[in-house]
Image (tube, rainbow, N blue to C red):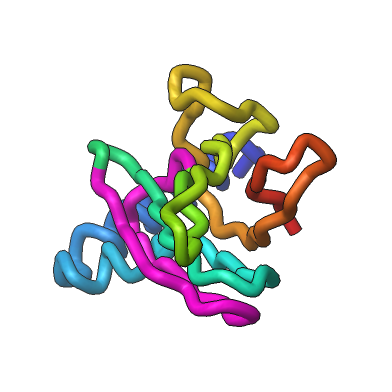
Amino acid sequence: MNTTSKAGWLVVLLLWVLAILPTNAQSGLIHHKVMVSNPTMHKINVSVVAANDKTYTKEIMPYAFDTFDVGAHCPSYLKGKIILPTGTLDIVLHCIGTSAEGSADWCFFTCSSSSWDIVKKSDGAYHFRKL
């Protein structure tokens, strides 16, 4: 049996296993998580936007972190706000799969887990930084 035949049989076996698993078990095979750390002294409100524009939003306390469990949905970008006593400041939107910032137009779905924190850059704006 040549290498191509072995690979073909492996694919067939994998598809057969997926076919006999219950639907909820299949979705458990793909499980993406996005962790965001808040090293600032302010609360932040962060959203992870995933496939099909599904949005997951959490408020993260100062010096804390939280994890967004997006399951089988592939994360696309992060957006958020710093919550100040006098109002809010935007955190610059950041694509999860690329280094693009500021607009979701250049974001693509990234089917993987990732970790981020918030940094204040020299221009005074807050940004997401991939860890």
> Residue at (47%, 73%) from the top-left corner?
60
Q: Nearer the viewer, residue 113 or 11?
A: 113
Q: Nearer the viewer, residue 123 or 76?
A: 123
Total marks in image: 0
Residue 114 position within the rendered picture, expressed as x and y whole percent measured from the top left = 61, 58
State which quadrant residue 40 falls in: bottom right
> Residue at (55%, 67%) from the top-left corner?
35
* Segment colored magenta: 54-77
State which quadrant residue 7 falls in: top right
Q: Nearer the viewer, residue 64 or 70?
A: 64
> Residue at (69%, 71%) from the top-left corner?
39
Figure quadrant of the N terminus:
top right
Q: Is residue 16 visible?
A: yes
- The answer to whether residue 110 is above or below residue 68 is above
Locate residue 38 relative to residue 72 in the image: left or right.
right
Q: Nearer the viewer, residue 111 or 106?
A: 106
> Residue at (42%, 61%) from the top-left corner?
45
Determine if the magenta segment contains residue 71.
yes
Q: Is residue 111 visible?
A: no
Determine if the magenta segment contains residue 112.
no
